[in-house]
Amino acid sequence: MHDEIFDIVNDRDEVVGQAPRREVHARGLWHRAVHVLVFNAAGRIFLQKRSLAKDTAAGCWDSSCSGHVDSGEAYDDAARRELGEEIGLRLARPPARWFRIEARPETSWEFVWVYRLEHEGPFVLAPSEIERGEWFTPAEVTDQIARAPELFAASFRYLWGLATAPA
């Protein structure tokens, strides 16, 4: 991983400084991230299996795409950038914001905006980021997380619980 610079934020998600990725993670500093969940018209969700070369949650199933918000970048811009970098989708506008998660241990101290997008693919997966991707029904994801939670990234398990909670 190159040494990206992230904005450090306070408990109100206001920028209070910057630090390299390595330091932000090592010190558990609050920072920002995005997750995009891509569903097709049949209601299936596309999940990525993270590359074994990733520094966190290597080889785990995760959101359709996700990533950190770079220093000075807006959440919506980060979502568009990550869609392009990870699964090859170039969008003129950001996907729809779905819900927000406050920084907490389950998100590795990231404030997260979760986006929802409908798209049929096909996708062009970045091999440095993603081993492979597959479509699942929401029930299959929920069942697999219940049976083998270790196969899924911790932040995805947490946000999936929020995404599928009864209204």
Image: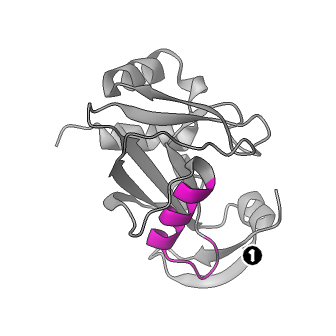
Counting every numbered tag in the picture gives 1
Magenta stretch, overall SS: helix
User: Residue 117: x, y in percent?
Assistant: 35, 51
Q: Is residue 93 visible?
A: yes
Could you say which is closer to the camera, residue 19 or residue 34? 34
Residue pictured at 46% horizontal, 19% vertical = 144
User: What range is drawn magenta here?
Assistant: 70-85
Say if 10 sits above or below 125 in the image.
below
| Image quarter (top left, top right, bottom left or bottom right) of the C terminus | top left
Q: Residue at x 40, y 55 (%)?
A: 114
Residue 57 pos. (x, y %)? 67, 38
Q: Is residue 16 above or below residue 56?
A: below
Label 1 CA crowd tier, 10 Å (few <14, some 14–19, many 20+): some
Q: Which residue is mark 1?
A: 19
| Relative horizontal placement of residue 44, taking residue 69 as reference (left or right) | left
Horizontal side of 66 relative to 138 (left or right) equals right
Q: Residue 56, located in which quarter of the rendered image?
A: top right
The location of residue 63, given as percent across then percent down, is 50, 42
Q: Is residue 83 magenta?
A: yes
